[in-house]
Image: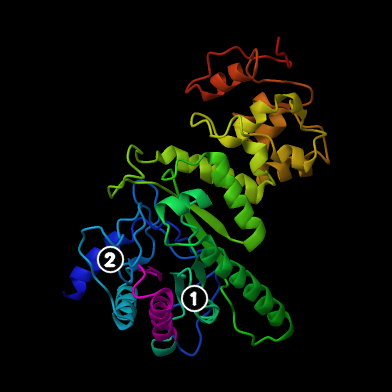
């Protein structure tokens, strides 16, 4: 099999791995090397369904010793198999980089022989790129669960970002769909990576020449929908991962029934809108101090696809609103649908000089299209008239609200 045939097979096999963000690294060129990684990340392009395809994104191999029920590369699946050597991956990366096709590498792999053997081959790719070609560009690799701590550490000193995929959001789903994998083999290296990042980070404060360890941090990915789990179970798992392992991101990959399995029979492809709602909720937890239990409950365990999670939370807690923007705290403003850090800061700064009105907000270029249902501006309410929470949810979900009645003062009667 020639290199082009391998590339076609292994690039296609990598398309289901979505955890390939590149922001956060500032690896600089040195010793007359080639390329560099900046804090702004590398240039991205996206497929029509929103998946990132910005890097040279390939698998080392699509052969695998595991037989996960959801995976196209599972051991028993009848598919064309191919395997790159470390030298081939490194040469491809450099050739593509020199032609300006890519600005970095995202490399994952099926498991061949055992986790340590596969991990050694991935590390070898990074060593060739860094030490033979002096490549200082962005490298993101997937660590292999179950591999040794020494290999994980070695990889962390060579690459910019590492992902250790949690695979499925619950232990129950993992036991059914990937029984050969153990949750401890996944979380243990996450913990090791967190500890190493802390140690090297502390050392760099004391010693200028301390090498960087994963300057862009670690991420993970979970498949959603394959285990019939609820959105609440998913975001609770994400919350735990963020709290325990200092992850940069959790990526959500909607289940696609690419292989037949009795355990996933009858499960359709996960809607992209469900992925989108989970990403929105994830952002609220990372950037707005929301908790999983704030957004969903056992009695309401899945997101309403017709409305975003922040608006849904605000409607379910309508007794907290409307808030007067001239007196509300920064954190109260951050809870208002349609307001974020930028708007909240503008409001806090501007009201030091005068009471704000709707004209003031317009001058500050602050949109109130969604926020107007939850705020008073100098005592004035311009949101929609509604009878109860469900009524407001229907009104906000409507594609066109211009014909609904507007109020000058808050009134829910």
Direction left: furthest residue: 1
State the extent of the magenta-drawn residues as a range: 102-130
Residue 112 is a magenta residue: yes
C-alpha gap between disc 1 and disc 2: 21 Å
Quarter of the figure that contains the N terminus: bottom left
Residue 16 % position (x, y): 36, 55
Q: Is residue 317 above or below residue 131?
A: above
Left or right of residue 374, residue 64 in this image: left
Instruction: Identify which residue, 213 or 43, lies in the foreground.
Output: 213
Instruction: Mark yes or no: residue 42 visible.
Output: yes
Look at discs 1 and 2 and give the one toward the viewer: 2
Q: Between disc 1 and disc 2, whose residue precedes?
A: 2
Q: Is residue 53 above or below residue 56?
A: above
Residue sitting at 45 percent across and 59 percent down? 19
Residue at image mark 2:
10
Q: Check residue 159 in the rendering and tell me which mark sits there, or answer none.
A: 1
Q: Check residue 174 in the rendering and tell me which mark sits there, or answer none.
A: none
Count all numbered tags in the image, as a single digit.
Answer: 2
Residue sitting at 52 percent across and 39 percent down? 230
């Amino acid at each position: 099999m020639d290199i082009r045939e391998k590339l076609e097979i292994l690039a296609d096999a990598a398309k289901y791995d979505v955890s390939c963000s590149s922001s956060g690294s500032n690896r600089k060129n040195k010793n007359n090397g080639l390329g560099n990684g900046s804090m702004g990340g590398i240039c991205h392009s996206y497929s029509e369904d929103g998946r990132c395809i910005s890097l040279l994104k390939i698998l080392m191999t699509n052969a695998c010793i595991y037989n996960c029920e959801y995976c196209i590369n599972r051991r028993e699946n009848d598919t064309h198999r191919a395997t790159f050597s470390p030298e081939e991956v490194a040469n491809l990366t450099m050739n593509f980089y020199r032609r300006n096709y890519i600005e970095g590498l995202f490399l994952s792999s099926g498991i061949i022989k055992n986790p340590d053997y596969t991990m050694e081959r991935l590390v070898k790719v990074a060593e060739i790129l860094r030490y033979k070609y002096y490549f200082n560009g962005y490298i993101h690799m997937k660590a292999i669960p179950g591999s040794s701590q020494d290999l994980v550490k070695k990889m962390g000193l060579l690459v910019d970002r590492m992902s250790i995929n949690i695979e499925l959001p619950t232990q129950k789903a993992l036991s059914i769909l990937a029984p050969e994998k153990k949750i401890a083999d996944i979380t243990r290296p996450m913990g090791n990576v967190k500890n190493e990042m802390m140690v090297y980070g502390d050392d760099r404060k004391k010693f200028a020449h301390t090498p960087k360890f994963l300057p862009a941090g670690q991420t993970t990915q979970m498949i959603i929908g394959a285990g019939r789990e609820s959105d609440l179970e998913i975001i609770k798992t994400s919350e735990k991962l963020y709290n325990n392992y200092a992850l940069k991101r959790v990526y959500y990959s909607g289940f696609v029934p690419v292989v037949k399995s009795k355990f996933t029979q009858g499960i359709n492809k996960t809607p992209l809108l469900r992925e989108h709602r989970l990403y929105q909720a994830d952002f609220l937890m990372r950037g707005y101090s929301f908790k999983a239990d704030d957004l969903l409950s056992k009695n309401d365990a899945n997101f309403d696809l017709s409305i975003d999670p922040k608006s849904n939370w605000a409607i379910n807690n309508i007794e907290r609103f409307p808030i007067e923007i001239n007196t509300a705290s920064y954190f109260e403003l951050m809870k208002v649908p349609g307001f974020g850090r930028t708007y909240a800061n503008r409001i806090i700064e501007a009201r030091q000089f005068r009471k704000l009105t709707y004209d003031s907000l317009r001058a500050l270029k602050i949109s109130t299209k969604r926020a107007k249902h939850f705020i008073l501006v100098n005592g004035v309410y311009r949101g929609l008239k509604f009878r109860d929470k469900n009524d407001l949810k229907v009104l906000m979900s409507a594609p066109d609200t211009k014909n609904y009645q507007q109020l000058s003062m808050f009134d829910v009667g």
